[in-house]
């Protein structure tokens, strides 16, 4: 009996000591800190005995959707058809392609070179209630978790993940509808995740087979594009950003926009049509650049008309401001020339940094295309080799380009009028657009003979107009000395008559 009482005394003493120590710890270490330390120790113990490694791929990194997540989603979609119980499906816009992806809370098993791997699709929500003013915002965040054994770490991180990303991106290109983007004014950037660019489906049918251009020149462009698409290792070896610049120059109607569409269809790239007049400054230009995807074409059409990128901008602005202020004073307006606040302040330096500066390396496999009708108006620093790597002249219609157009519009590869048209084309300056207009049948009752006959008449009329213009120019040059003498004599006659009156 005495032993039992001694035993309970010892237990009571131990409990009292524990309570005293616990109360003391609570004074110096709050319960939350103790719990946190215990959880850390437990997680380390669990990780030590856990034979698996887990990798998590979140859908968003900051406000930008992860390209790795999108590639993994496409890759797992093809694998989950035979394994997952729940699938999500949607149709690519303007196509009949059905795209399937893993549903939420689904698991998938895969074997890669004899190693077993497990994928899991999960979705988490933040603990607090998020407030959003926009209905399209979704506070839930999806992620994929990859699980594998520790001994397979080198194979998975070194080979398997690269294989998954490569296959996923290739599947995206095959199933994804290409898009044509345009930049929104910065006043509409209320949701920085979705509203810097807006887009529509890109469905232009142009190909290099239908482009009206000499075959040798088209073959040169195709060869350059192919070398660029296969040049990842080359650009890494020479230490350059993986990008290429093309300058398309020539008169209006020579097919510059059609060439851009043919390049996009050949490369299977999205197009970002950048409207510089809607970009307020260099900072906005950089934001737009960082929101473009890899494997894309950035286009600035009619760059000589978009904004003033020459050194005369300050002179023009000051002269226009002085004229506007004078008009404002005359009309009694206090704030004349306030439109200057809405004028684009993109500078030549900012555009050059956009093309080949530090910010141009924020993406890869990107093509930049400028178009202009007046090559002489552009600053040489903007179009030098290294920035615009390939200069492509879009010339007036040649006989070889005409044969391409004739095949496109009439289906003919030869005709009795072809030789006559071939002799007349070098004598006039007619754009491929004007030739195509003549070859286009406006009704079912118009046949190929009538279209070619109309083209011959148009070429004859253009030849007559060209001769008349040349004669007027020659007569104007020959009459210049005579006109100058007449002006001098008239000035002297006017001076003598004024002296006689005085």
Image: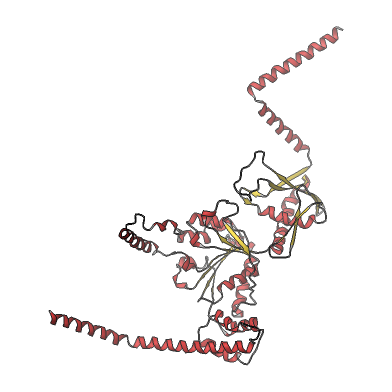
**Residue at left 69%, top 19%?**
21
Q: Tell whether 287 sits left or right of 329.
A: right
Q: Is residue 234 visible?
A: no
For the C terminus, the quadrant is bottom left
Front residue (pair 202, 356): 202
Q: Could you tell me residue 321's position as x and y percent? A: 36, 60
Q: Residue 428, relative to residue 323: is it above or below?
A: below
- Indicate the quadrant where residue 475 lies: bottom left
Q: Could you tell me residue 383's position as x and y percent? A: 49, 68
Front residue (pair 67, 498): 498
Q: Residue 19, relative to residue 112: is it above or below?
A: above
Q: Tell whether 165 sits left or right of 482.
A: right
Q: Tell whether 173 sits left or right of 355.
A: right
For the N terminus, the quadrant is top right
Q: Could you tell me residue 254's position as x and y percent? A: 54, 77
Q: Residue 133, relative to residue 361: is it above or below?
A: above
**Residue at left 49%, top 88%?**
463
- Indicate the quadrant where residue 50 lies: top right
Q: Could you tell me residue 261's position as x and y percent? A: 61, 70
Q: Tell whether 203 sits left or right of 314.
A: right
Q: Residue 493, relative to residue 284: is it above or below?
A: below
Q: Is residue 114 visible?
A: yes
Front residue (pair 306, 190): 190
**Residue at left 78%, top 43%?**
52
């Amino acid at each position: 009996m005495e032993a039992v009482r001694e035993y309970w005394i010892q237990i009571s003493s131990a409990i009292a000591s524990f309570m005293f120590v616990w109360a003391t710890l609570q004074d110096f270490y709050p319960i939350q800190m103790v719990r946190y330390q215990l959880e850390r120790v437990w997680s380390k113990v669990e990780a030590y005995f856990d034979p698996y490694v887990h990798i998590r791929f979140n859908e968003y990194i900051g406000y930008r959707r992860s390209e790795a997540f999108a590639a993994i989603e496409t890759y797992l979609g093809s694998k989950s058809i035979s394994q997952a119980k729940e699938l999500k499906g949607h149709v690519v816009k303007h196509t009949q392609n059905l795209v399937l992806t893993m549903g939420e809370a689904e698991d998938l098993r895969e074997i890669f070179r004899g190693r077993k791997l497990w994928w899991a699709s999960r979705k988490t929500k933040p603990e607090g209630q998020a407030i959003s003013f926009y209905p399209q915002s979704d506070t839930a965040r999806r992620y994929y978790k990859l699980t594998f054994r520790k001994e397979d770490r080198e194979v998975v991180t070194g080979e398997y993940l690269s294989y998954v990303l490569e296959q996923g991106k290739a599947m995206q290109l095959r199933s994804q509808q290409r898009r044509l983007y345009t930049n929104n004014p910065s006043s509409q950037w209320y949701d920085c995740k979705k509203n810097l660019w807006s887009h529509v489906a890109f469905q232009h049918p142009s190909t290099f087979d239908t482009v009206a251009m000499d075959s040798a020149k088209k073959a040169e462009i195709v060869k350059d594009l192919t070398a660029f698409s296969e040049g990842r290792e080359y650009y890494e070896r020479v230490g350059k950003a993986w990008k290429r610049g093309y300058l398309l120059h020539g008169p209006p109607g020579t097919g510059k926009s059609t060439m851009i569409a043919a390049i996009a269809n050949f490369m299977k790239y999205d197009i970002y049509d950048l409207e510089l007049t809607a970009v307020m400054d260099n900072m906005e230009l950089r934001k737009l650049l960082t929101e473009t995807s890899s494997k894309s074409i950035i286009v600035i059409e009619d760059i000589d008309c978009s904004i003033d990128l020459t050194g005369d901008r300050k002179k023009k602005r000051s002269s226009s401001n002085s004229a506007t202020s004078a008009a404002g004073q005359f009309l009694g307006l206090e704030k004349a020339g306030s439109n200057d606040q809405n004028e684009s302040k993109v500078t030549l330096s900012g555009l050059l940094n956009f093309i080949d500066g530090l910010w141009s390396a924020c993406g890869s496999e990107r093509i930049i295309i400028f178009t202009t009708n007046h090559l002489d108006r552009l600053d040489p620093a903007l179009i030098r080799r290294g920035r615009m790597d390939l200069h492509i002249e879009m010339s007036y219609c040649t006989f070889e380009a005409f044969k391409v157009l004739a095949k496109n519009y009439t289906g003919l590869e030869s005709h009795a009028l072809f030789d006559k048209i071939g002799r007349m084309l070098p004598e006039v300056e007619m754009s491929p657009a004007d030739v195509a207009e003549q070859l286009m049948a406006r009704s079912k009752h118009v046949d190929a003979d009538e279209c070619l006959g109309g083209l011959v008449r148009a070429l004859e009329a253009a030849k007559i107009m060209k001769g008349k213009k040349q004669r007027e120019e020659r007569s104007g040059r020959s009459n210049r000395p005579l006109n100058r003498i007449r002006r001098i004599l008239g000035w002297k006659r006017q001076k003598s008559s004024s002296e006689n009156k005085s």
